[in-house]
Image: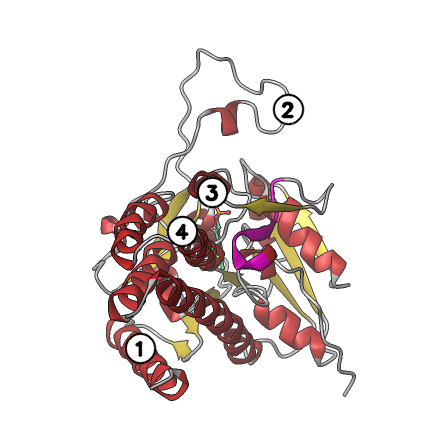
Amino acid sequence: MNERKFSVPETIRWGPGGLSALILDQTLLPGLHEEKELSTLDDFIEAIVSLRVRGAPLIGITAAIGLAALARQSAAEGISADRLRERFAGWAEGLANARPTAVNLVWAVRRLRARLEAATGDAGALAAALAAEADAIHEEDRRMCRAIGERAAALLAGGESVITHCNAGSLATGGIGTALAPVYVAAETGRRVRVYADETRPLLQGSRLTAWELSRAGIEVTVLADNMAGSLFASDPPDIAFVGSDRIAANGDVANKIGTYPLAVLAHRHGVPFYVLAPTSTVDLGTRTGAEIPIEHRDPDEVRRGFGPLLAPEEAGVYSPAFDITPHELVAGIVTERGIHRPPYTDSLAAAVRAAEVERRHRERRHRPT
Ligand code: MRU
């Protein structure tokens, strides 16, 4: 078999001394490939809000690294453990509220909080515990992406065309992505997969990011403006749709980038199986249905101006939700690192989340110093 491994772009890494983070600034892609250093709480929040880092898993990883970097800086000032715990509460609140829809953000912050609560020792020891947890979240995400890719690659026999929306690729995660992971896995073993990337108005994550990372990997990708998808489905429908998610409710309703729901409706109309690929960290058992998922609304200027000249008069109102909800009835399957879940989703998603939690606790017990 003709095997090749892909080196995906590094989305985030520790800065010098572990006191900051270096992120690939995604607002500059595809024109410029530049890193930006994040040092202060405001830097981390600004990077998440302005989508320099984006994608549900990656913003969770960024918040985790941010909390640990801030803790290391405070420990280096020589503050007490109690003072560090107080400061952590403020940082955690600021980061958790940076964007409301992606549950991975609060999930990561909660994990760091739990690690801090369990840790003992001086400020240096607490900061080290937080950094270890941030590394664990990053490493787990890498593994979850690979597992999702391997499971979902079974849905691709070879020669397929896949349609995707927004960017749920390596740029959205710490690994090979979620929705794009099976494409990388299939291509690694020599299978030909063609990808249609919805442009994804208004911030163009599909054309700027998905098309960039796939082209860079030598995978065939065709960009279409979102309003061209109907024409594509009517004339030459793709074989399968793969999208990511920012939050999956307990019943399988899916929040993802605005435009995902119309894509699911089109897929349903044309008999194209519509799959959601996401780690268990995106499943929120505390949210019963999609109606309970908070939807972020963004600055009207993202629609009004896009990346350049005025596209709508200043006087016009703008409706700009960043995410929509796809009801579970339109979803053929949800692929997590634990398997391909089929409807009805409630029991199998709950079992997957609990099993992932148990496995993580076992791993922690094995790796933590006694
Ligand atoms: O606003 P963004 O660019 O953060 O939106 C990203 C998405 O909608 C992704 O599909 C989702 O976060 C899943 S990423 C694996």
Q: Position of residue 316 (x, y in %)?
A: 44, 15
Q: Residue at x 40, y 56 (%)?
A: 75
**Disc on the earlier residue, 2 or 1:** 2
Would you place residue 110 above or below residue 166 in this image? below
Q: Position of residue 289 (x, y in %)?
A: 23, 57
The residue carrying pointer 4 sits among few (fewer than 14), some (14 to 19) or many (20 or more) residues within 10 Å by Cα, namely many
Indicate yes or no whether the magenta region holds residue 19.
yes
Name the mark nearer the viewer: 1 or 3.
3
Q: Is mark 2 within 8 Å of ligand 1?
A: no
**Disc on the earlier residue, 4 or 3:** 3
The residue carrying pointer 2 sits among few (fewer than 14), some (14 to 19) or many (20 or more) residues within 10 Å by Cα, namely few
**Disc on the earlier residue, 2 or 3:** 3
The residue carrying pointer 3 sits among few (fewer than 14), some (14 to 19) or many (20 or more) residues within 10 Å by Cα, namely some
Q: Is mark 4 within 8 Å of ligand 1?
A: no
Q: Is mark 1 within 8 Å of ligand 1?
A: no
Q: Which residue is mark 2?
A: 308
**Disc on the earlier residue, 1 or 4:** 4
Q: Which residue is mark 1?
A: 357
Would you place residue 314 above or below residue 8 in this image? above
- Disc marking residue 74: 4
Q: Residue at x 43, y 42 (%)?
A: 45
For the question of whether residue 168 can be seen, the reply is no
**Disc on the earlier residue, 2 or 4:** 4
Distance from the alpha carbon under mark 1 to that under mark 3: 31 Å
Q: Which residue is mark 3?
A: 40
Nearest to the observer: residue 196 or residue 44: 44
Name the mark nearer the viewer: 2 or 1.
1
Amino acid found under the numbered disc labelled 3: Thr
